[in-house]
Image: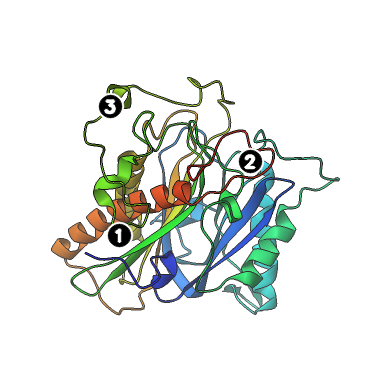
C-alpha cells in the first residue's frame, strides 16, 4: 500500500475540499464537496457529539447520497456552517429533488474550540454560516493542513491539534482517503517524546519520519489527557471523513466508518471518551466502478484505519504556532 499522489482525501476522484478560518476567532470550517451525490453513512463513538442530518445516513433511511459534508469549530454554534454550504450548493443547482425544489444534503459535525484563546465576541449571529458558504465555494483538489479550516483552533493533550489528511492506493486499484479535525481529549504522542503513536502506519516521512523511539518511555504507558494537564476538559472531539472511490452500499459505507474508528485508537490515547464527540462520516463516490468482494472489503477496512491514523498525526504535526495559543505546536 502506498500514498496517493497528493496524499490527501481528494486523491479520491469526485471530491474537493475547501477551508475557511478566522485567526482572531481561532476557529474555522472545512467542507468536503462531492462532484456528484455520493453514498454516505456515519458512525459515532464519542460520548459528546454535535451533529446535523446524521439520522438520514442510517442504512434503513430513504436518502442514499449526500452533496457535501461540513466539519466546523464553534461547538453547537458551528452547525450553522451547513446552512452556508447549502446556500452555495443551491446556487449551483445541487440537491435532492423534491418536486420542483432541490434540497442540498449536507450532514455536519462540530468540535468544541470555544475555550482556546480566541475571541468569540461575535454579534447576534455567529460567523459559521458565512464561513461554510465561503468554504464550499473555495473547494478544490488541494488544501492546507494543520491550523486551517476546522482544525484552526483545535487542541489535544499538551499540543495544538489541527486538520489532517492522507490517502492510500490499494493493490486492487481502489483509493481511500481520510480527512480529520483533531481536537482530542487524549494525546497523539508517546509520553514526553515527539514520536507519534501512529508511527507504525507512517508512509515515508509524511509526519517527520521519526518512527518509534529506541526505547518506549515509561510515561508513554500512562494515561495523559487534558484533565491531567490542567487544560479545559470540556473542549474536545475528533471529527473525520473516510472516503473511497469504490462502489459501496449505504450499509457497507456504515461498516467502513466503523473500521475507520480504529485509526483513532491507533493514533490517539485515550480516544472515544465520554468527553469526546468522536465520529466518522464515510463517503463512497463509486468513481472507480469497482464493487467489493468480502476479501476486498476486509483490505479496504484495514486501509481505512491506517489511513485515518496517518491523517491524525499529519494534522497535529503540521499545526503552526500563533499568538494567543494555549498549547505549543508540535513544530515548535
Q: How is the image coloured?
A: rainbow
**What element does badge 1 sit on?**
helix
Q: Left or right of 274: which side holds 200? A: left
Q: Residue furthest right?
A: 123
Give me the disc on residue 91.
none
Give me the disc on residue 252.
1
Taking depth in this image into account, of 50 and 175 the one nearest to the observer is: 175
Where's the N terminus, which quadrant? bottom left
Question: Residue 116 is drawn in which quadrant?
Answer: top right
Q: Left or right of 217: which side holds 241? A: right
> Quick check: 98 above or below 83?
below
Please name the residue that numbered disc 3 is placed on: 217
The reply to whether residue 28 is in sight is yes
Q: How far apart are the alpha carbons under marks 3 and 1?
A: 39 Å
> Quick check: 47 above or below 164?
above
Q: Earlier in the sequence, mark 1 or mark 2?
A: 2
The residue that appears at 49% across and 38% down in the rendered structure is: 277
| Of marks 1 and 2, the one in the foreground | 2
Amino acid at each position: 500500500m502506498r500514498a496517493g499522489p497528493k496524499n490527501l482525501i481528494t486523491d479520491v476522484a469526485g471530491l474537493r475540499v475547501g477551508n475557511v478560518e478566522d485567526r482572531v476567532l481561532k476557529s474555522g470550517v472545512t467542507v468536503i464537496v462531492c462532484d456528484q451525490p455520493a453514498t454516505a453513512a456515519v458512525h459515532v463513538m464519542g460520548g459528546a457529539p454535535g451533529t446535523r442530518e446524521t439520522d438520514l445516513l442510517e442504512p434503513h433511511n430513504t436518502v442514499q447520497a449526500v452533496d457535501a459534508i461540513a466539519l466546523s469549530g464553534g461547538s453547537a454554534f458551528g452547525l450553522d456552517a451547513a446552512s452556508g454550504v447549502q446556500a452555495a450548493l443551491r446556487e449551483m443547482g445541487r440537491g435532492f429533488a423534491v418536486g420542483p425544489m432541490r434540497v442540498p444534503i449536507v450532514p455536519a459535525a462540530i468540535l468544541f474550540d470555544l475555550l482556546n484563546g480566541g475571541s468569540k465576541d461575535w454579534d447576534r449571529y455567529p460567523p459559521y454560516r458565512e464561513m461554510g458558504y465561503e468554504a464550499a465555494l473555495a473547494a478544490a483538489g488541494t488544501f492546507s493542513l494543520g491550523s486551517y479550516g476546522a482544525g484552526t483552533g483545535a487542541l489535544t493533550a499538551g499540543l495544538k491539534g489541527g486538520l489532517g489528511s492522507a490517502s492510500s492506493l490499494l493493490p486492487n486499484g481502489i483509493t481511500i482517503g481520510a480527512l480529520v479535525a483533531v481536537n482530542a481529549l487524549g494525546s497523539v504522542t508517546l509520553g514526553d517524546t515527539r514520536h507519534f503513536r501512529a508511527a507504525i502506519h507512517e508512509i515515508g516521512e509524511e509526519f517527520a519520519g521519526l518512527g518509534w523511539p529506541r526505547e518506549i518511555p515509561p510515561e508513554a504507558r500512562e494515561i495523559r489527557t487534558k484533565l491531567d494537564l490542567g487544560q479545559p476538559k470540556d473542549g474536545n472531539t475528533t471529527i473525520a471523513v473516510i472516503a473511497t472511490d469504490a462502489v459501496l452500499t449505504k450499509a457497507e459505507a456504515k461498516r467502513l466508518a466503523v473500521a475507520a474508528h480504529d485509526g483513532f485508537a491507533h493514533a490517539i490515547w485515550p480516544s472515544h471518551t465520554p468527553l469526546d464527540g468522536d465520529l466518522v462520516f464515510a463517503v463512497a463516490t463509486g468513481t472507480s466502478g469497482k464493487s467489493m468482494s468480502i476479501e476486498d472489503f476486509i483490505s479496504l477496512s484495514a486501509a481505512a484505519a491506517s489511513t485515518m491514523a496517518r491523517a491524525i498525526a499529519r494534522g497535529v504535526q503540521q499545526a503552526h504556532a500563533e499568538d494567543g495559543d494555549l498549547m505549543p505546536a508540535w513544530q515548535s
